[in-house]
Image: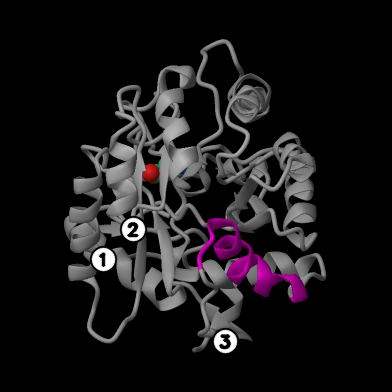
Amino acid sequence: MHLRDEAALASVLPYTARQFARAIVMPNLRPPVTTAAQAVAYRERILAALPEGLDFEPLMTMYLTDNTPPDEIKRAKDAGVVALKLYPAGATTNSDAGVTDLRKTYKTLEAMQREGLLFLVHGEVTDGDIDVFDREAVFVERVMKPLRAAMPELKVVFEHITTQEAAQYVTESDRFTAATITPQHLLYNRNAIFTGGLRPHYYCLPVLKREEHRQALLKAAGSGLPKFFLGTDSAPHVAQLKENSVCGAGCFTAISALELYAEAFEAIGALDKLDAFAGHHGPDFYGLPRNTGTVTLKREPWTLPSAVPFGEAQLKPLRGGETLNWKLIA
Ligand code: DOR
């Protein structure tokens, strides 16, 4: 998920720390976190912004570029970095410094495979002739399959999957491939972006897809398969910039993430699978110990604030102003 930096970081971090004992922190700052030293410095800024009394472990990632040197991987490992993230250049928010051709990074990916660092993938091609709704399915064929063949023992997380094609690919792949699914992709299809007008707060990347894809994601999340686990991709943006002629991609869900997942799992009668999806499958795949603490969700209606402070600005959560049926009470 995205914590941003400086005043924005201080505004959003408490929401995540209230819900989660740890989180995988995305590196697409401006400038991006491309070295082990920058990841360590960012971790320190996160810990410094943590309010008294909240325990939270940021799990740090680095932003892969065409030029990330293979010997940076050992430094990353020694610094406690858990993964590198693929942003295909131009695919999403702050991805300008991203990878132009994954083959350019293969030496670095080999070093990650050796050192046991994970590879987190924003799985979309960016070619102008590919329809925006097809970018993920094309990525599976053009990038994922060659990557898996070249680097079979690299642990790859196909992040925030949105399509039937990606869900099927991950279901059929071996134990080195897993995927995360966001709450918004479980709860909404692409109609949400266009209901009664253009709705920027439902715009994220990869963009919401057709209903048949949402159904495939629900099936994957509710399957109990350990390859699928929680990953919110919660992505705060200044409300004024979301409601602008050009709107950045991202849904802010950190404030009610577990409640939103509970709603999705309840809708398919799979509440009994939520615990493992949220708390077991992720750490098992990452090779981390499972958390021993617990949280308590109660079926109790409450109204999400329509906006919260975000540094000097405002931030509008997904579903802001609406009533949720589940509430995190402890
Ligand atoms: O919707 C998104 N927002 N998708 C991403 O991949 C990046 C994120 C952001 O940083 O805002």
Residue 228 picture quarter:
bottom right
Q: Amino acid at mark 3?
A: Thr
Give the number of the disc on residue 237: none
Mark in front: 2 vs 1 = 1
Mark pair 2, 1: CA separation: 10 Å
Q: Amino acid at mark 2?
A: Leu
Give the number of the disc on residue 296: 3
Mark 2 and 1 residues: CB-CB less than 8 Å, in contact?
yes
SS for dot 1: helix
SS for dot 2: strand
N-term-proximal mark, 2 vs 3: 3
Residue placed furthest toward the front? 114
Mark pair 2, 3: CA separation: 26 Å
**Main SS, magenta residues:** helix
| The magenta segment | 272-288
N-term-proximal mark, 1 vs 3: 1
Identified at 31% across, 64% down, the residue is 12
Give the number of the disc on residue 11: 1
Q: Note whether 128 is above or below 307 in the view shown.
A: above
Side of 184 relative to 99 (left or right): right
Identified at 31% across, 67% down, the residue is 13
Counting from the top left corner in percent of width and height, residue 284 is at: 60, 63
